[in-house]
Amino acid sequence: MAHVELRNLEKRYDNDAHAVKGVTLSARDGEFVVLVGPSGCGKTTTLRMVAGLEEITSGDLFIDGERMNDREPKDRDVAMVFQNYALYPHMTVFENMAFPLKMRKVPKAQIKIQVEDAAKLLGMDKHLKKKPKELSGGERQRVAVGRAIVRKPKVFLFDEPLSNLDAALRTQMRAELKRLQRSLGATMLYVTHDQVEAMTMGDKIAVMNKGELEQFGTPSEIYERPATVFVARFLGSPAMNVLPGGIIHEPGESYFVSDMLKIKLNGHFEAGNVHLGIRPEAIVLEWESKGTDSISGKLILIEPIGSVTHYYIECEDAFGGTFVASVPHGPVTLAGATLSLGDSVTFRIPSESIHLFDRQSGKRMD
Ligand SMILES: Nc1ncnc2c1ncn2[C@@H]1O[C@H](COP(=O)(O)OP(=O)(O)OP(=O)(O)O)[C@@H](O)[C@H]1O
Ligand SMILES: [Mg+2]
């Protein structure tokens, strides 16, 4: 299929909105790359520049080593599926899927073969004569995808294709799209603002914020070593706990200190103002404080969600606010007693699970 490369891609709209600020990333042949980030961060704009629907202000776009900046959309060999994919209501499923081929004046017999192939792949071969209104939401979605795959393009661009579906269907389509992408060996750029979709579907994830690329890496790299506080808090649910504090040195050792905490750090860090990050699942609940790496607080919310339970603790540290601890299976018993709302609890922040970010730049420190 294809290798897609974005080099320092910039977009300024005429009204001077600086929508995309120097994004550099690449999707190797057959790779599934997810662009994720909050609303307005420039995901759709980035995708539209790749598709050729939006002019590239500066930077370079390469597909298989060829510079595409000035190529017409139809000459880029990409297919895009939009968030609000519109099917033609008066056309059958077959006609909807055949449409892009018809536009390209592909011979009828060839169209039939390609549409039927695509329909089979999507499990839609029994629905080819139906009109969109006779289909379920998921089936309509499949027709929109079918319309993109009939042409066998080099690159697929998907812009939040599942956002109109309910939760159960979304989960199912997620798995289907991933399977489809694998079986086609397609190179795919996929936009979503759903972090679960990003983590489960992407071979690589590009996390965007305010037009900038914050981090580009595999799901595990991004989860285990977030490059910025923004990335740390954007991926993971509940979000990573973040506590402001400072790094101080004592002979031979670096410590994180805040109002109530003092944690000996593994390794040497420069002194200064930082944010400490700790994932909810890395927090250890205790009945009472044992060391300076523990804080006490009051249990204000218990959220059992099946496989794990989230404990929200309003902590006594002046800068701490509310911490969340996730514990597999619940309810938690400490020294034989079950935790309940209003209890005073202590939690420990294990040094080996800490993430440290420079408070000024937001960047990871190690
Ligand atoms: N045609 C346009 N003219 C001017 N500004 C635009 C245009 N399209 C988008 N923008 C601005 O560019 C920024 C990025 O928009 P974009 O649609 O790429 O965001 P997004 O990440 O796709 O958001 P969402 O998740 O809401 O779809 C926004 O601030 C938006 O207002
Ligand atoms: Mg968008």
Image (cartoon, rainbow, N blue to C red):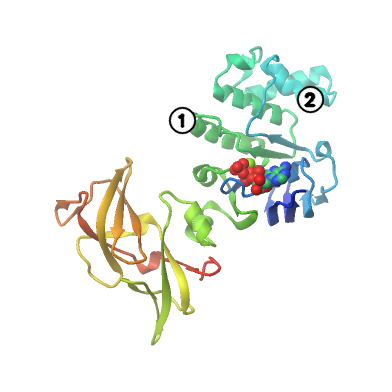
Secondary structure at numbered mark 1: helix
Measuring from the top left, give residue 354's x and y in whole percent. 41, 66
Measuring from the top left, give residue 5's x and y in whole percent. 73, 52
For the residue pair 176 and 263, the one nearer the viewer reads as 263
**Position above or below: 111 against 46:** above
Residue at 33% over, 65% down: 349
Question: Does the Cβ of the disc 1 residue fall within 8 Å of ligand 1?
Answer: no
For the residues marked 1 and 2, what is the alpha-carbon distance in whole angstroms? Answer: 32 Å
Q: Is residue 152 left or right of residue 280?
A: right
The residue indicated by pointer 1 is 168
Bin the neighbour count of mark 2 within 10 Å (Cα to Cα): few under 14, some 14-19, many 20 and up: many
Residue at 71% over, 22% down: 97
Residue at 66% over, 34% down: 82
- Name of the residue lying farthest toward the bottom: 251
| Residue 224 in view (yes/no) | yes
Identity, as a three-letter code, of the amino acid under mark 2: Leu
- How many marks the image carries: the answer is 2
Q: Quadrant of residue 23?
A: bottom right
The residue indicated by pointer 2 is 101
Identity, as a three-letter code, of the amino acid under mark 1: Ala
For the residue pair 308 and 113, the one nearer the viewer reads as 308
Q: Quadrant of residue 162?
A: top right
Rendering quadrant holding ligand 2? top right
Measuring from the top left, give residue 363's x and y in whole percent. 54, 66
Q: Is residue 113 left or right of residue 161?
A: right
| Residue 33 in view (yes/no) | no
